[in-house]
Image (tube, rainbow, N blue to C red):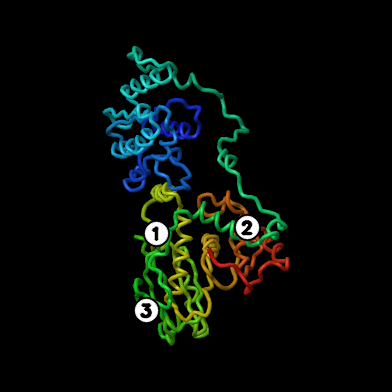
Amino acid sequence: RSGGGAYSWWIAALDDRIQCAVPVAGVTSLRDHVINGCVEGHCDCMYMANTFRWDYATVAALVAPRPLLISNTDKDTIFPLEGVIDIHRQVRHIYELHGAGENLGLQITEGPHEDTQELHIHAFRWFNRFLKHDKSMIEKTAVKFFEPEQLKVFAQLPTDEINTTIDEKFVLQARVPSVDDVLKDQDAWYNSRLGQLRERCFRAWPDSDPDWKPATETRLESLSVEEFELAQQEIWQRVRIHFESESHVPLYLDVVFSKEKTLESLEDATMIVSDGKDPLKSYGSGSRSLLPQSACIVVFTPRGMGPHAWQGDEAKQRQIRRRFQLIGTTADAQRVWDIRRAIQVTRQVCTSLKAAPVIRGEQSLEVLVLLATLFEPTDGTQVLSDVTADPKNWPDILNLTRTITPQELVALVAFRNEIADTPQSQEVSAFAKKLMVDSRWRAVGGNRPAHG
């Protein structure tokens, strides 16, 4: 029941040695979890790494055609009745396709989120029916034979226990390939890694870029432009560009440039991806030589940060992050998409750019910027100040550490952009440097492959 109900779903779906299952209060629909907020009543045992963006009916259907009784109470607030019935409706179709409709049952009894006697009786009859082929009445109801203390195994936990970190051993981490293997076919390695990132880590990205129009078409047709004052306004001006990163995700970027220029006449752009602190303060001394007259600074903050921060305490923030994971992504993965969209909008707005924007990421956002540059054309040198080889310091992105290593990420970026390391990042840049020593490695400005 509850967490045990979830374990019943996972083990019955994964292992056909389970001949009969009665998960109680262990499943409801993604709509209940994400939109209606049931996610906030649960712990991590209830969730899967939802790479392929399944609803829970797909998990339940994996049990077919084995006997499965979906069991719940009618007033369970964290497994609402409507969601449970919807799961049963979808799974019933699969059982019928198997010709095993009699092996699927739905039990709804009165009560809250509790392990009631009525739930026990029907579960016992279900087991007797399918495991013992016995349909007789239940004579002995559930009674407690042991107190919890009697079931205790260890007087004290072993000092060498690995339960605390077992998740790190279940999942194999990606390994850095040999330089020779990569150099055998650089294009194949590059395209393979980009394809795996898109398929495993960024599967939830939109299939197309919303509101994107080439620069040759009507500019700003679907963007909102806001002008406002800036310190040293006799020299600089700031224009705010509002756009949707994806449906129902409004964001904006600020473009700072010389009073003597227009958006359409800017030839160079540097984008700063910020965590919400105002990076423009570092440009506040405001001398005319601060920027070339043809250049501009674009400041962008992805969703959930700074002016776009989600409201609530740390517990609420955790539940927001869980919502993303339930639908097959993470907040950080969608921030990479936001950065891509900001690059696109900058190119759309500044129609005279001679090259793609130079892009910089502040601190914790640096890895997100590197990932975005793999899918969008950018220019300039990426400074690896906060990129480490420790996967524990990486952003939260599904399957990232099992798909690619920090060293490979830096090498992928170096495949089309210049990189400059720091003492802190030399461990991750060494692999890329070994590759670039070979004359076959594409130099910056050379014939690089198209963006993914």
Q: Is 405 in front, or is 226?
A: 405
Instruction: Name which quarter of the figure residue 205 lies in.
Output: bottom left
* Dot 2: element: helix
Residue 309 marker: 1
- Quarter the N terminus occupies: top left
N-term mark: 1 or 3: 3
Specify few, some or many for label 3: CA neighbours under 10 Å numbering under 14, 14-19, or 20 or more. few
Q: Is 399 in front, or is 87?
A: 87
**Location of residue 61 with respect to 277 vertically, above or below:** above
Could you give the CA–CA distance between mark 2 and mark 3, rounded to whole angstroms? 43 Å
Give left or right: position of 67 versus 295: left
Specify few, some or many for label 1: CA neighbours under 10 Å numbering under 14, 14-19, or 20 or more. some
Residue type at the position of mark 3: Glu
Q: Which residue is mark 2?
A: 408
Specify few, some or many for label 2: CA neighbours under 10 Å numbering under 14, 14-19, or 20 or more. many
**Location of residue 396 with respect to 96 vertically, above or below:** below
Residue type at the position of mark 1: Ala
> Which residue does the image show at 41% across and 40% down from the upper left?
58
* Dot 3: element: loop
Could you give the CA–CA distance between mark 1 and mark 2, rounded to whole angstroms? 31 Å
**Which residue is farthest bottom?**
260
Give left or right: position of 395 versus 130: right
Q: Which residue is mark 3?
A: 229
> Which residue does the image show at 58% across and 73% down from the upper left?
380
N-term mark: 1 or 2: 1
Q: Is 282 in front, or is 127?
A: 127
User: Nearer the observer, disc 2 or disc 3?
Assistant: 2
